[in-house]
Image (cartoon, grey):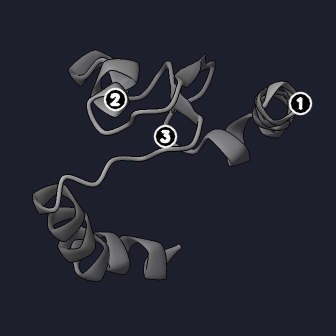
Amino acid sequence: MCEDYRAAATIDLEHDRESRERGQRVQCPLLVLWGEKGKIGKWYEPLAVWRDYADGPVDGHALDTGHYLAEEAPGATVDAFEDFFGAV
């Protein structure tokens, strides 16, 4: 988990900026999940944010969780993955 946060604040951020400068966009279908009790859905429109970065279809929804979806609602998280990957 700590490595993920480190990468997001360093090399991942650098790579994201570089790909945006080149005009690269996500081409594959995306599943966007966020916690209903968290801040993401209150601060942003998650699907709209990701549609700005993608050419492929973007789908998703909030789960009845806070920030840690998989830890707080593992069944609902897996169900969302199975629905998404079964549909792709």
Q: Which label sits in the foreground, 3 or 2?
A: 2
Q: Is residue 7 left or right of residue 70?
A: left
Give whichever of 25, 36 is nearer the camera: 25
Q: Amino acid at mark 3?
A: His
Say whether residue 63 is visible. Answer: yes
Give the alpha-carbon distance from disc 3 to disc 1, as whole Å. 25 Å
Mark 2 or mark 1, which has the lower sequence index? 2
Mark 3 or mark 1, which has the lower sequence index? 3
Q: Is residue 72 left or right of residue 34?
A: right
Q: Is residue 72 left or right of residue 25?
A: right
- Mark 1, Cα crowd under 10 Å, few <14 / some 14-19 / many 20+, is few
Residue 4 bears which disc, if any?
none
- Mark 2, Cα crowd under 10 Å, few <14 / some 14-19 / many 20+, is some
How many marks the image carries: the answer is: 3
Q: Amino acid at mark 1?
A: Gly
Give the alpha-carbon distance from disc 2 to disc 1, as whole Å. 26 Å
Marks 1 and 3: in contact by CB < 8 Å?
no
Give the alpha-carbon distance from disc 3 to disc 2, as whole Å. 8 Å
Residue 86 bears which disc, if any?
1
Mark 3 or mark 2, which has the lower sequence index? 2
Residue holding disc 3:
67
